[in-house]
Amino acid sequence: DAGVIQSPRHEVTEMGQEVTLRCKPISGHNSLFWYRQTMMRGLELLIYFNNNVPIDDSGMPEDRFSAKMPNASFSTLKIQPSEPRDSAVYFCASGPQGDSPLHFGNGTRLTVT
Amino acid sequence: EDQVTQSPEALRLQEGESSSLNCSYTVSGLRGLFWYRQDPGKGPEFLFTLYSAGEEKEKERLKATLTKKESFLHITAPKPEDSATYLCAVLNSGNTPLVFGKGTRLSVIA
């Protein structure tokens, strides 16, 4: 089991550019979550999917953010256009449904200049 | 709205100096309280789940306890390798996902 795999590990981009973050969840997990972590706000849930279907995207900051899960083994989080305030570490996590613990990837550190 | 507050924000201990981290929570029906460890540059790693008041879980030098309002993570005779950020999260009885606290940054000095 390779765990949750995120790419890239680091992304540096200029304001206004499109950014795409990628996630491969653990095989067999039904749920996938995108979190953002900053020193000020901690871990914030952006969106989550059950069985590839988006369930709650109320945490997505604004329309510049979008997420997709085209199949059970892949998800993307896109920011277009990016802004400096989007700079943070973005985590993907997956888990079986119910109250089982989530498994996190090692994150993508995004810097927007 | 579910809330999780962790204290202290940061804690510095000498090696062997036992202490406790606190996680206070308000939740509409607790289904589970989770403790995670996060090392720099990595994602949170699961440690424990507690389901009901009075429950305790142990792993090496760590022991987690739960009451109706808070959870404690006790660290006995810590070592430098225990240095990390410890995160607490709650899962409620509804359909909403984990809500995390901001964590406690623990430094253990040799």
Image (spheres, coloured by chain):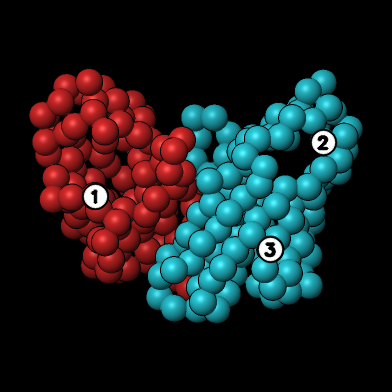
Chain colours: A red, B cyan
Front one among A77 and A72: A77
In the structure shown, which secondary structural element does the residue marked by tag 2 occupy? loop
Q: Which quadrant of the view contains residue A36? A: top left
Judging from the image, what secondary structure is the residue with disc 1 in? loop
* Label of residue B70 in the image: 3
Label 3 or label 2, whichever comes before in sequence order: 3
Which residue lies under the disc numbered 1?
A61
Q: Chain of mark 1?
A: A
On what subunit does the disc labeled 2 rest? B
* Horizontal relation, residue A95 to residue A55: left or right: right
Q: CA distance from mark 3 to mark 2?
A: 22 Å
On the same chain, marks 2 and 1? The answer is no
Q: Is residue A68 left or right of residue B2?
A: left
Q: Dot 2, how many residues are within 10 Å of its Cα: few (below 14), some (14-19), or many (20+)?
A: many
Question: In the image, is residue A56 above or below residue B30?
Answer: above
**Quadrant of the snapshot with the C terminus of chain A:** top left
Q: Which residue, given by chain and number where applicable, does mark 2 sit on?
A: B78
Are the residues under marks 1 and 3 on the same chain?
no
Q: CA distance from mark 2 to mark 1?
A: 39 Å
Q: Which marked residue is nearer to the observer: mark 3 or mark 2?
A: 3
Contact (Cβ within 8 Å) of mark 2 with mark 1:
no
